[in-house]
Image (cartoon, rainbow, N blue to C red):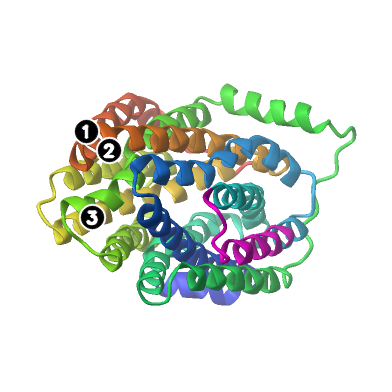
Amino acid sequence: MSSALALLRRRPQFRALWTAVALSYIGSGAATTALTLYVQETRGTGAAVAAFLIAANAPRLLGPLAGGIADRLDLRTLMVGCDLGQAALFAALATLPPFGVLIGLAAVACVLQTAYGPARTAAIPMLVDDDELISANALLGVATNLYVAAGPLVGGLLFATVGAPAALLVDAATFVGSALLTRTLPSIPPPEVDEPEGLLSATAAGARFVWADPVLRAVAISMCLLVAFVAVDNVALVFLTRETLGGSAAAYGVIEVCFGLGMLTGSFWVLHWAGGRWRPTRLLLLACGLSTLGSAGGGIAPSLPALGAAEAVTGSGNGIDVIATETIIQQRVPRGMIGRVYGFTSSAISLGLGIAMALGGFLVDATSPRATFLIAAAGGLLVTVAVAPTMLRARAIPRST
């Protein structure tokens, strides 16, 4: 913690971005939890919850295009614009419009989130030194993990006491605060190029770069497949908590907080111990194993506390995965292509998430929440075994320029 606090103290611009991300992610976690509970309560089916979650995540498939935009625009301007746009959208969602409009607004908000991600990742190497990169990513992981470490508790409590609109208005306010903090960063223009490519050509170049690098290719494919299996619990969890184990709406929020606390634990572990000892490729392999183990634990959990412990294990894998993936990209990819490569990789993950949402809704309705968790664990194990040789053989390389 002392080294993490020291980094925040000596890098005020990174500190501003870190605070902006933490603030907006707490609000987004509260909003997502409140909306999930609202849909589950008013619609009552796994298919409806899955439809909402698909709409809230499907636009991430546009990541390569969003990354191409980030590689050619000022990063500060892009991040501020995304924050203000999301503030307006979540204020509109607070009116609880009809279901079709609700999922449409959630999808548009996801478009802005998709553009924000590559811009944020590309900005980090501009705000810290090379030897601070993995610590900075771990700290940023702590901030993004507040989405599930604090946001669901806030969202569950607000939903149980004053309803979904309050949680959504809180989220809108946090995006305004994030925009004001990001506005204090210096301008981060794109690198100069002799002959600018068209957006589609530049996007294709990013895809070719990923495919040509065996480690980046393995990361994109394995993360897509892993998420396609283990993320089915995004649908199954609310049913396992509320119907199988008899928990309340607040209990569902607490269970999601356990996942977030696991993410925080994974991030702090990297900060305190693993950052200087583990290669990011090996951290990624560890993350796959932990996520698989947590899914298996959720499938056999006999009580809410046991389910919370299993979600914490899954969360620790997710937290380590985020740090490992972003560090691999920042080390292996030139500055002018980070946005596109990040966008391509995040879209591969989002494709897996979309598959998981559809599969999760089907499995919950056709089998049971417990069976859904166990199927997720079996698939995660297969992916972990398949990607292990590439991750273990990968050599360490210096950060690309």
Q: How far is disc 1 from disc 3 in space, using C-alphas?
A: 16 Å
* Residue plotted at (40% across, 69% down): 159
Which range of residues does the magenta coloring cover? 81-99
Q: Which mark is residue 367?
A: 1
Vertical position of residue 213 compared to residue 79: above or below: above
Labels 1 & 2 near each other (Cβ < 8 A): yes
> What percent of the width, then of the height, locates residue 231?
36, 41
* Residue plotted at (31% across, 31% down): 384
Question: Crowding near pointer 3: few (<14 within 10 Å), some, many (20+)?
Answer: many
For residue 359, side relative to residue 57 (left or right): left
Residue that mark 3 sits on? 241
Query: Upstream in the sequence, badge 1 or badge 3?
Result: 3
Residue 395 visible from this viewpoint:
no
Q: Which mark is residue 364?
A: 2
Give the amino acid type for the residue marked by disc 1 in the picture. Thr
Q: Quadrant of residue 242?
A: bottom left
> What percent of the width, then of the height, locates residue 109?
62, 53
What secondary structure is marked by label 2?
helix
Q: Quadrant of residue 356?
A: top left
Give the amino acid type for the residue marked by disc 2 in the picture. Val
Give the amino acid type for the residue marked by disc 3 in the picture. Thr
Q: How far is disc 1 from disc 2 in space, using C-alphas?
A: 6 Å
Question: Crowding near pointer 2: few (<14 within 10 Å), some, many (20+)?
Answer: many
Residue 190 visible from this viewpoint:
yes
Asked if the magenta segment contains residue 156, the reply would be no
What secondary structure is marked by label 3?
helix
